[in-house]
């Protein structure tokens, strides 16, 4: 893997004007075989015992996964829930093919965005009536940020700053820069760990990620939300890497607005619609920058003037993408009777065990974890920094262990407790050890 002919890594694209500078340095921790560490046979039998004692292990049967594959990329594209193919076939053949346009009422297509929002809401700690499903995360972020700037201006006019997580996933930074230009705000990049210090009387809106997509760092949503409110700002949380992996508690922590995608830990399928959370107390004043006819109080009156519907449905824009949306609705059945707290406990146990296996199998000095060791700071993934990460990941995938590569040097392993077990974690680390020889 240290072939000197390896092509150079591509240079990351330059940030557009006003966008976000380089992420803060990762916290890194070296891993590697120690002479007194556990032997492989011990780890394999421990994995077996941990799987046997795992109450969530049976949930794997709710998914269709190929044999022989260890799937550690459910934080990029969740696995296929077993109910989705038949439901989707029914939606296409019967609801669309036979019922045709009657399905908007008879198959309850029209109300799907709010209905599925309510189905998803308990997973993010939201009471009914505050989540609407539709569009992409990028588009919902745009609605949320411009809506937040308008709420902030109405509550406390003249504030000038939009604070944005400096290490954010690119689309969030790009959308924030555009939303700021449109609303007259200035983007200020902040390290989320110190974001509270940057909040002040000039802060209008704060946009933060609950879990950093690259490092897997979990940020303190309750404390940062409270700090934003103490400064008089509106806070928007991006839940892409936390919803479905750990408790979020939007209502409990009085979050203002949130967005997230459903094709990662929520297994909605490629390009599944995202969601927008608008806390009850903000709904009446939420002024969407995309006031499409679906968010109108009386859409079929076809009037020339826009009158927003009273509830969260004012976050809707145009005709919903019904095929994807109803696939998501079926996918969410995989959560029936599942507690997010139990998922969190298993996720931490899995990531701890994976780190232990990596330390036992991989030669010292070859990889270092950039994911925080502290549970309070860890999401549901482990990111390992190594030389030639792109080639190492390609090799892992060819050996049946699917994770992903994030430029410039990160191997990313997502742990999705509904369908990943301890034996998977052990095999992934063992395979990584073999690659390093
Ligand atoms: C996955 C992800 C997105 C995806 O945005 P799309 O509009 O669905 O492409 C956005 N933000 C974050 C933080 C993500 O992790």
Image (tube, rainbow, N blue to C red):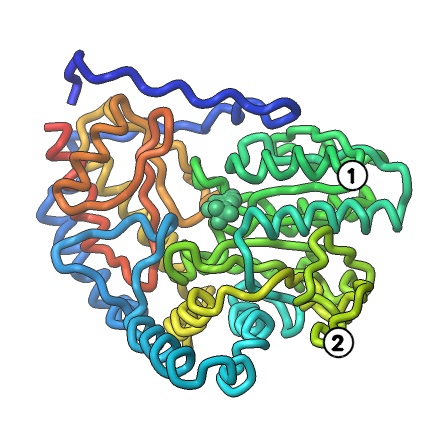
Question: Residue at the spot x=54%, y=74% of the render?
Answer: 112
Q: Residues within 10 Å of mark 1 (few under 14, many from 20)?
A: some
For image coordinates 42% across by 81% down, the residue present is 95
State the residue in front, 246 or 68: 68
SS assignment at label 2: helix
The picture places residue 200, in percent across and down from the top left corner, at: 81, 35
| Outermost residue, top side | 4
Question: Which residue is at 40% across, 49% downward?
Answer: 380
Query: Image quadrant of residue 189?
Result: top right
350 with respect to 135 (left or right): left
Neighbourhood count class around disc 2 (C-alpha, 10 Å): few under 14, some 14–19, many 20 upward: few
Between 430 and 206, which is closer to the camera in this rendering?
Answer: 206
Residue behind mark 1: 183
| Residue found at x 79% / y 40% | 204
N-terminal label among 2 and 1: 1
Image coordinates for residue 372, horizontal then vertical, percent = 44, 37
Residue for badge 2: 301
Q: Residue furthest right?
A: 157
Residue 426 position, x and y percent, is 19, 48
In the rendered view, would you say 17 is above or below 158?
A: above
Q: Secondary structure at mark 1?
A: helix
Q: In which quadrant will I find the C terminus?
A: top left
Q: Quadrant of the N terminus?
A: top left
Report the residue that reaches farthest toward the bottom. Answer: 106
Residues at marks 2 and 1 touching, judged by CB atoms closer than 8 Å? no
Q: CA distance from mark 2 to mark 1?
A: 31 Å
Residue 154's label in the rendered image is none
Regarding residue 196, the answer to whether it shows in the image is yes
Residue at disc 1, CB closer than 8 Å to ligand 1: no
Which residue occupies the foreground of this view, 272 or 125? Answer: 272
């Amino acid at each position: 893997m240290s072939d000197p002919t390896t092509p150079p890594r591509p240079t990351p694209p330059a940030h557009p004007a006003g966008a976000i500078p380089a992420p803060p340095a990762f916290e890194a921790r070296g891993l590697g075989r120690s002479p007194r560490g556990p032997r492989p046979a011990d780890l394999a039998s421990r994995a077996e015992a941990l799987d046997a004692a795992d109450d969530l292990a049976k949930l794997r049967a709710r998914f269709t996964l190929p044999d022989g594959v260890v799937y550690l990329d459910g934080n990029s594209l969740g696995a296929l829930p077993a109910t989705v193919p038949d439901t989707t076939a029914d939606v296409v053949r019967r609801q669309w093919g036979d019922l045709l346009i009657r399905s908007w009422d008879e198959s309850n297509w029209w109300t799907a965005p709010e209905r599925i929002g309510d189905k998803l809401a308990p997973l993010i700690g939201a009471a009914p009536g505050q989540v609407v499903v539709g569009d992409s995360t990028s588009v919902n972020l745009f609605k949320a940020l411009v809506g937040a700037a308008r709420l902030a201006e109405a509550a406390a006019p003249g504030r000038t700053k939009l604070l944005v997580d400096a290490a954010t996933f690119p689309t969030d930074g790009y959308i924030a820069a555009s939303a700021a230009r449109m609303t007259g705000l200035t983007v200020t990049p902040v390290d989320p760990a110190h974001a509270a210090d940057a909040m002040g009387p000039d802060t209008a809106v704060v946009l933060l990620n609950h879990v950093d997509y690259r490092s897997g760092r979990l940020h303190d949503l309750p404390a940062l939300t409270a700090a934003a409110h103490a400064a008089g700002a509106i806070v928007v949380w991006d839940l892409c890497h936390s919803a479905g992996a750990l408790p979020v508690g939007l209502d409990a922590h009085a979050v203002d607005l949130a967005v997230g995608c459903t094709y990662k830990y929520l297994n909605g399928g490629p390009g599944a619609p995202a969601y927008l959370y608008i806390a009850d107390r903000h709904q009446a004043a939420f002024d969407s920058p995309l006031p499409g006819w679906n968010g109108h109080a009386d859409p079929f009156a076809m009037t020339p003037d826009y009158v927003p519907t009273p509830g969260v449905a004012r976050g809707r824009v145009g005709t919903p993408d019904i095929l994807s949306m109803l696939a998501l609705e079926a996918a969410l059945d995989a959560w029936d009777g599942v507690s997010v707290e139990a998922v969190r406990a298993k996720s931490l146990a899995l990531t701890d065990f994976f780190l232990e296996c990596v330390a036992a199998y991989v030669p010292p000095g070859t990889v270092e974890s950039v994911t925080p060791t502290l549970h309070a700071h860890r999401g549901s993934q482990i990111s390992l920094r190594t030389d030639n990460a792109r080639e190492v990941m390609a090799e892992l995938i060819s050996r049946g262990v699917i994770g992903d590569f994030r430029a410039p040097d990160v191997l990313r392993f997502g742990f999705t407790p509904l369908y990943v077990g301890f034996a998977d974690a052990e095999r992934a680390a063992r395979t990584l050890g073999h690659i390093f020889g």
